[in-house]
C-alpha cells in the first residue's frame, strides 16, 4: 500500500504503519519510571500519553478522554500546588499516584469501543505518515514520544478480569481424543455443536519474556502405589491466540453473533503452558486446573481487528449447521502464519518445531464470544478469550508437543538434540505474522523459558 | 461468654460481638451516596471509615493505614483547596474520586494479613463492648457510625480476581457420580488424592439479593435431532461456602499447608447456581462452563476465621493418607449449621429443603488452598475458593436439587406445591450459623430469585 511512515520500518518488521498494535510499556525516563500506553512502529514505540498531552488526539471522541492519560504528570502537578497548602495532603496525593500507576492498562480505551478505536487509528496513521509534519517536524516531541523499542520493557497490556480458553481447532481436538481415547470416536459429539471451553486462571497470565517455573504436582499412580508427586515430567506449550474483549455486556444480556466483532478489540499470541501429567490425573470430571494454572504467556502487542481486516478469509464450512444463535451472516477467519521455535537449554540456536495458521480454527472468534454470553454471562473490557491450540492437518503444523511427539512416544529432533517434552532451560518462542503487499502486520514474539521448580 | 455489646443484640441475631463480620455497604447519607467498609453488630452496621476518621483505630498497624479510608472525604477536601488554585485541577480531582469510589472493597485490609485482622478485631470488640465509653458515650459519632442495617444496601465485599470452585464433599461426589455414571464406581480414583476443582467465572459473582436470569443454552440432543436450545429446564442451586483469600503468594511459590490458614481471611455463603442440562451437554472433556457462569451469589458478610475458631472441630480422617504436601499438623473443620429454604413463585412462605453442615467436607479449606498453589499458581487478596456443594450423608442434607430430586426423578414437596428444578419466580435462601453459649456467630442469608430469560 502507498501509506508510508516517516519512521523507518524495515521490510521484515512486524510493525508497519498498517499495523499499529497497542501495548503498555515501562520506560526509565526523567526522574520516575512510568508505565504508559504505546503503539509499535518499526523499531520504535510511540508514547500515546505524550501524543495526548501534545493535543494531537484531536478527534471528537479522544480529545477529551483520559484513556491515554498519564496521570502521574497531573498528580505531580497537584502535589506542587498542594505542598503550599498542606503537608498531609501531599502525602496522600503520592499514595493515589502510586495506586493508579500500578493499574496502568488499556482497559479504558478498550471500553470506548469501535468508533474511538477507528478515530485513534486514523489519527495515528496520519501522524506517523511521511506526508504529515506535526510529529515528524517537531524534534522535541519526537524525542519524548518516539522511544527505541530496545529501551522499553513491555508489561501486560490489559487488566484481565477473566480468562477463558476454547478448544476450537478440530485437528487438535481429534489428535488429543485419539491419544487419550483411541481412534474410534476421538471427537466428542458436543464439539461439533458448540465451541467447547473452560475458565482459565487470570492471575498467572504473564507477559512474554517471563520465566516459567516448572510446576510440581500429582501424576497418575502406577499400580497400587500412591500418585507420583514432584516436578512435572510432561511440560508442554500450546500454540494459541487470544481475542481481547472491548466493550462488555451486562449480566443476563447475551451478545448477538452478528454484533460480536464490535466487542473484540484485537488479538495476541498466547502460550497456554500445560503439564500433561498433572492434567491427565486431575481433569476428570471438572476439567483442567493445576495442569494449566501455573502460567500462561501472552505477547505484548495487541493487533487490532482493523489491522487484521485485509487478512480476513472465509471460515470453514460447518457441518452440522450451527444453531441459529451461532449462525453468522459473515463467518471470518484470518490468514495469520504462526511459528513455534524452541531454543534447547544450553544451545545458541532455536529450531522451528511447528508452522501453523490461525485459519485452521473451526469456530470463529465471534462465535466463541457469542457462545460465551448466550447464558447471560457478562464479559468485561480486557477479558481474554484463548482460541485453544491451533493445530493444522499436517504433523508439521501440530500446535503442541503432546501432538508433535504423540504424547512422548516419538522424539522431536532439535538440532543436535531431541525432545519429548520441555526440559529446564528450554525457551519456547512463538511468532505470528500476516504478509501484506510490501508490508507486514505482525504480532512480534511470545516467549518464555522454563526454570526448575523451587525446592 | 461474658463479652457484651452496648448495641442491642437479640438472642437470635447472627451478629453478636463475638462475630463482627466485614462487608461493604452503600448508604445514602449527606449529599453523596458512598460505599464503605463496615462490620455487622445486631441490627446495625458500624461504619469503619467513620471509626478510622475518629482516630479510634489506634493500634500500630491500622492507625496509619488507609485500608478503611473513606477517600471521598479527603478528595473533597482537596477540591476545596484546589478550587482556589485552578479550575482544571478541580475537575480532575472529581474524576479520581469517582474512579476510586467504584473500587471500594476490603482487598487492602485483606492484604495486610493476620496481625492487622487481630488488631482490628480487638479494637472493634473493645469499642463495641458495654464497658467501653469512647463510642457508646459519643452521641454524634454513634449517629454517624452506627447505621440501622435496614437503611443500607450491601455490595460485593471484595474485588474478586479469580474464583475457584472445589468438589470437597464426598457425599456430593458420590451422589453425582451415581446419578451420572451408576453406582459401581461413583467416585473417580483421583478424588481421594487431591481436592478436585475447576476455575469459575469471576465477573458473574453477585451479592445476595440480586435476581438471577434463567440462562439459555444447549442441552442434549434426542436421537438425531439437533441439541435442545432455549431457557434451561434444569435450573438448580448448590449450597456452598467459600474462603476469601487474604495475603496471596508469588507465582512459582507454593503455600505450605501448615501456613495456609494465615492466607484465609474468612468465609461466606455461596450459591453456585447450576443449569444441569447445559452442564451435562457441555462438560466433557473440559469441565463446567456455561452451566455455571451465568451467576454465582455470595452473602455480604465475611465471617473471619478468628470468629469461627470456637466452632472448629476435627476434619474427617482421610484414607488413603494424603501426600506430604497436603498432610496438616492440625486438620480443622468448622461446625456451621447450614439451611436452604425455597420460596416458591407466588407463595408467601418459604420451606426448608435441606439442612447440612460445613463439617461434612472431606478436604479442609487449608488443603484446598495449598493444593491450589502447589503448581506455583499465585493467589491474590480477595480470591474466592468455593468448597463445592456441601451435602451430608442423609437425603435431608443433600445440597442441591440434582441430589434432592435425584436428577428430577422425584418431586420435592414445598408446601402446597412441589419442585423437580427451580421455576421462574422461585427464591432460594441459604443461611448459616454457629451456635455459641448464649450467642451466635452467623452468616446471615444468601438469597436470589429466578427471573425469566430475556426473549
Ligand atoms: Ca489450551
Ligand atoms: Ca459447585
Ligand atoms: Mg496456562
Ligand atoms: Mg455459578
Ligand atoms: Ni492528559
Image (spheres, coloured by chain):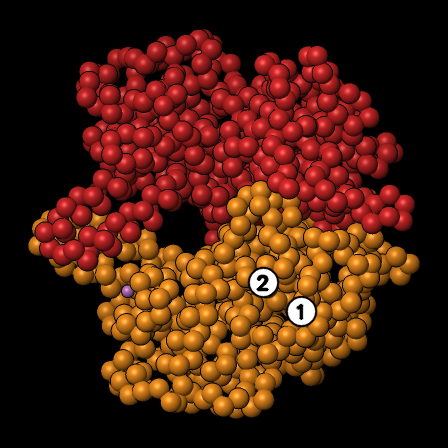
Chain colours: A orange, B red
Q: Residues within 10 Å of mark 1 (few under 14, many from 20)?
A: many
Residue A276: x percent and y percent?
A: 71, 58
Residue under the image location 53 percent in, 75 percent down: A307
Q: Ligand 1 within 8 A of label 2's CB?
A: no
Residue A385: x percent and y percent?
A: 60, 58
Residue under the image location 47 percent in, 87 percent down: A3
Residue position marked by numbered label 2 in the rendering: A261
Instruction: Give me the C-alpha separation between circle 2 and circle 1.
Output: 10 Å
Residue B81: x percent and y percent?
A: 12, 48
Towards the viewer: B188 or A186 = A186
Residue position marked by numbered label 1 in the rendering: A332
Towards the viewer: A70 or A251 = A251
* Residue B358 against residue B325 in the figure, above or below: above
Q: Secondary structure at mark 1?
A: strand
* Residue B296 against residue B252 in the figure, above or below: above
Circles 2 and 1 in contact, beta carbons < 8 Å? yes
Left or right for A218, reference A89: right
Left or right for A416, reference B206: right
* Residue B196 against residue A441 in the figure, above or below: above
Host chain of mark 1: A
Residue B22: x percent and y percent?
A: 40, 30
Q: Is residue A236 visible?
A: no
Residue under the image location 35 percent in, 73 percent down: A47
Towards the viewer: B335 or B426 = B426
Q: Is residue A89 visible?
A: yes
Residue A353's quadrant in the figure? Answer: bottom right
Q: Ligand 1 within 8 A of label 1's CB?
A: no
Pick whichever of labels 2 and 1 is earlier in the sequence.
2
Host chain of mark 2: A
Are discs 2 and 1 located on one and the same chain? yes
Amino acid at each position: 500500500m502507498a501509506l508510508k511512515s516517516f519512521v523507518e520500518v524495515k521490510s521484515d518488521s512486524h510493525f508497519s504503519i498498517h499495523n499499529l498494535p497497542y501495548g503498555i510499556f515501562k520506560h526509565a525516563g526523567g526522574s520516575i519510571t512510568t508505565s504508559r500506553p504505546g503503539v509499535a512502529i518499526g523499531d520504535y514505540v510511540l508514547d500515546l500519553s505524550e501524543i495526548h498531552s501534545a493535543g494531537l488526539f484531536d478527534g471528537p471522541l479522544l480529545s477529551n478522554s483520559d484513556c491515554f492519560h498519564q496521570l502521574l504528570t497531573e498528580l505531580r502537578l497537584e502535589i506542587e500546588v498542594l505542598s503550599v497548602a498542606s503537608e498531609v495532603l501531599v502525602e496522600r496525593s503520592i499514595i493515589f499516584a502510586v495506586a493508579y500507576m500500578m493499574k496502568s492498562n488499556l482497559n479504558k480505551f478498550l471500553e470506548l469501543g469501535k468508533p474511538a478505536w477507528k478515530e485513534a487509528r486514523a489519527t495515528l496513521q496520519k501522524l506517523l505518515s511521511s506526508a504529515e509534519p506535526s510529529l515528524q517536524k517537531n524534534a522535541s516531541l519526537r524525542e519524548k514520544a518516539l522511544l527505541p523499542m530496545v529501551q522499553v520493557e513491555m508489561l501486560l497490556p490489559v487488566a484481565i478480569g477473566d480468562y477463558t480458553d476454547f478448544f476450537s481447532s478440530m485437528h487438535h481436538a481429534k489428535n488429543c481424543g485419539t491419544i487419550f481415547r483411541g481412534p474410534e470416536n476421538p471427537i466428542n459429539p458436543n464439539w461439533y455443536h458448540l465451541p467447547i471451553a473452560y475458565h482459565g486462571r487470570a492471575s498467572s497470565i504473564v507477559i512474554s519474556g517471563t520465566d516459567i517455573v516448572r510446576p510440581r504436582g500429582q501424576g497418575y499412580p502406577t499400580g497400587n502405589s500412591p500418585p507420583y508427586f514432584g516436578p512435572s515430567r510432561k511440560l508442554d506449550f500450546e500454540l494459541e491466540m487470544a481475542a481481547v474483549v472491548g466493550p462488555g455486556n451486562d449480566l443476563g444480556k447475551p451478545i448477538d453473533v452478528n454484533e460480536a466483532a464490535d466487542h473484540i478489540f484485537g488479538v495476541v499470541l498466547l502460550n497456554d503452558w500445560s503439564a500433561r501429567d498433572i492434567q491427565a490425573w486431575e481433569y476428570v470430571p471438572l476439567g483442567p486446573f493445576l495442569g494449566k494454572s501455573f502460567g500462561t504467556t501472552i505477547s505484548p502487542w495487541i493487533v487490532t481487528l482493523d489491522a487484521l481486516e485485509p487478512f480476513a478469509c472465509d471460515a470453514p464450512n460447518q457441518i452440522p449447521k450451527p444453531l441459529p444463535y451461532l449462525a453468522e451472516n459473515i463467518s471470518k477467519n484470518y490468514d495469520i502464519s504462526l511459528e513455534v521455535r524452541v531454543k534447547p537449554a544450553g544451545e545458541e540456536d532455536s529450531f522451528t518445531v511447528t508452522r501453523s495458521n490461525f485459519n485452521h480454527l473451526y469456530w470463529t472468534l465471534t462465535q466463541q464470544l457469542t457462545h460465551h454470553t448466550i447464558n447471560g454471562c457478562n464479559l468485561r473490557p480486557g477479558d481474554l478469550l484463548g482460541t485453544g491450540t491451533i493445530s493444522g492437518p499436517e504433523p508439521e503444523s501440530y500446535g503442541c508437543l503432546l501432538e508433535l511427539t504423540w504424547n512422548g512416544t516419538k522424539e522431536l529432533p532439535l538440532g543436535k538434540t531431541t525432545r519429548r517434552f520441555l526440559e529446564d532451560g528450554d525457551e519456547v518462542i512463538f511468532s505470528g505474522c500476516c504478509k501484506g503487499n510490501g508490508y507486514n502486520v505482525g504480532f512480534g514474539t511470545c516467549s518464555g523459558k522454563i526454570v526448575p521448580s523451587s525446592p
